[in-house]
Each structure stands twice: as C-alpha cells, then as structure tokens.
C-alpha cells in the first residue's frame, strides 16, 4: 500500500537492505519486553528490564553479525553508548504506560495463521496476546516510534486488524481490544473492532492480493514517491530518482509471496 515498487524489491527481487540503528533498536527493545514476562511478576521492574538489554543485544549480534557494521567507525564507543541509552529510554517509557506486575499474557510472539475462504493464507506474529477471565482477547503491539497523527491512525491499525481477522477466523472470537503502545512518545492507541471491521479488512486484503497477482503477471509495480523515500535503500534503481529496476525475476508461485 505504501509503494508497490518497494514491495517488489523486497518480496520478489529480495534485494538486500542495509541494517539500520532504528530497526536494530526496535528488535532489541521488543526482545527485552518479551523476556520481561519470563520473570516472576514481582521482579518485573525497570531495573530488571534494563539489565536484559545488553544480553539481548549480544544475542542479536550473534544471530546477525552484520549488525556490528552499524558501529564500525565508533572508535570511542560513544555511538553505541548513545544507541543503548536510547533503547534504555524506550524500555523505561514502557513502564509509564502499564504495570507488567499485574499482567500474565496468554501468549508472546504468537504465530497466527489462517486460510480465507478464497484460499489465501494469512500469517503473522503478534507481540502479545492478553486473555481476560471471561475469554475476551486483547492484541498488543509495541512500537518504538511515535504515535501517528489522527489522520494516519487507520493506516497504523491495519496491521492490528489483520491480526484480529486471523484470530477471529481461527478462534471464532472477535478480539475485544487492539492496543498499539508507542514508546517513542508514551502514547497508546486503542481500538475496539467488530465483525463489520474485520469483514472489511478481509475484503481489503483480498483486493491487495488481487493487485499483487495482477502486478506479477504484468510486471507493473509502480513507484509511489513520498517522504519515506529518504530512508529507502533502493533509490538508485527507482524510476522516480532516475534509476532503472532490474528485470523482473520469473515469479515464484504467487501463493508463496508475502503480503507485506
């Protein structure tokens, strides 16, 4: 939805993208908040959470050694120290939004999957799923950026409605609450979906998939220039910046392409 050509570069061409400090920070903060709930409730303090930060960074680097390149020129360690301080601030921000000692999530990093009546298979990972004693479900997603302005909230909620749709299709229960926690400015975006919302989301997903299938057949993945282009790794190949995309690879089985 943001840029069809970028989707092609990522999902079909699978062009490499340089790791970014912001993305790595988000991954580490998510890991800390996931591991936090491994601790007994009484121990879920800011201090214990911050103590998890360095080990989670070391674990991530062990899995993805290329991340060390983010700080190759950091001869005095100041850039890494600043990065760690920013990650610490995001973790501390989490504790201003909720009290984890009063929570026992039903699932964390939950893999969800379903097949729609059309045969389209949906997959995703939910940061956290909370279940109330009466069975009501709350989907929680952590964001390390800032909350969107009101006119962009619907776009931000699409991901959450996607998860809600999959849970509804697999469990027969419409999640009671969708909750986006923006640690960058300590804001929470909440939304209560209903069946009409999720039916509309299903129609939108089907329309997106139809567009993807059509584009793989015609080869027409159009660029959509905008402010986010400043962070794109593929400007040299983008017609909006005078570039030429590589020849479209022979498409894999369309059903294997990711939606996002």
Image (spheres, grey):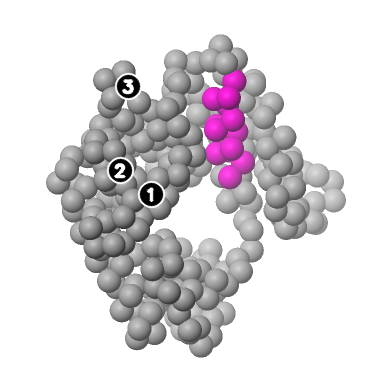
Residue at 68% x, 37% y is 56
Residue at 64% x, 63% y is 18
Q: Secondary structure at mark 2?
A: helix
| Mark 1 and mark 2 residues within 8 Å of each other at the beta carbon | yes
| Above or below for 153 versus 17 | above
Q: Which region shows up in magenta?
A: 27-39
Q: Earlier in the sequence, mark 3 or mark 2?
A: 3
Residue neighbourhood size for the residue with mark 2, other residues' Cα within 10 Å, grouped as few (<14), some (14–19), many (≥20): few
Residue 52 drawn at (x, y percent): 67, 29
- The numbered mark at residue 148 is none
Comparing marks 3 and 2, which lies closer to the viewer? 2
| Above or below for 145 versus 224 | above
Report the magenta stretch's main SS: helix
Which quadrant of the view contains residue 224?
A: bottom left
Q: Is residue 218 visible?
A: yes
Q: Which residue position holds label 3?
A: 132
Q: Earlier in the sequence, mark 1 or mark 2?
A: 1
Q: Earlier in the sequence, mark 1 or mark 3?
A: 1
Q: Does the stretch in magenta take in 33?
A: yes
Q: Secondary structure at mark 1?
A: strand
- The numbered mark at residue 113 is 1
């Amino acid at each position: 939805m943001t840029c069809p050509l970028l989707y092609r570069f990522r999902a079909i061409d699978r062009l490499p993208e340089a790791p970014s400090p912001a993305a790595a920070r988000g991954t580490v903060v998510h890991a800390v908040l996931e591991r936090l709930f491994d601790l007994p409730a009484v121990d879920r303090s800011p201090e214990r959470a911050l103590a998890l930060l360095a080990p989670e960074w070391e674990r991530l680097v062990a899995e993805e050694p290329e991340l060390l390149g983010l700080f190759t020129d950091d001869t005095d360690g100041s850039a890494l120290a600043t990065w760690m301080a920013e990650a610490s601030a995001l973790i501390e921000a989490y504790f201003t939004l909720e009290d984890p000692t009063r929570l026992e999530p039903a699932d964390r990093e939950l893999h969800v999957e379903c097949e729609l009546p059309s045969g389209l298979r949906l997959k995703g990972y939910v940061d956290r799923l909370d279940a109330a004693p009466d069975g009501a479900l709350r989907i929680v997603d952590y964001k390390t950026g800032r909350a969107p302005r009101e006119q962009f909230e619907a776009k931000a909620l699409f991901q959450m409605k996607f998860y809600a749709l999959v849970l509804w299709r697999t469990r027969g229960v419409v999640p009671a609450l969708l909750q986006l926690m923006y640690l960058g400015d300590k804001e929470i975006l909440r939304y209560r979906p209903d069946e009409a919302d999720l039916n509309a989301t299903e129609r939108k997903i089907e329309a997106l998939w139809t567009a993807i299938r059509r584009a793989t057949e015609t080869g027409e993945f159009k660029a959509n220039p905008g402010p986010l282009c400043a962070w794109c790794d593929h400007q040299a190949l983008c017609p909006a910046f005078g570039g030429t995309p590589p020849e479209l690879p022979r498409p894999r089985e369309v059903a294997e392409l990711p939606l996002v």
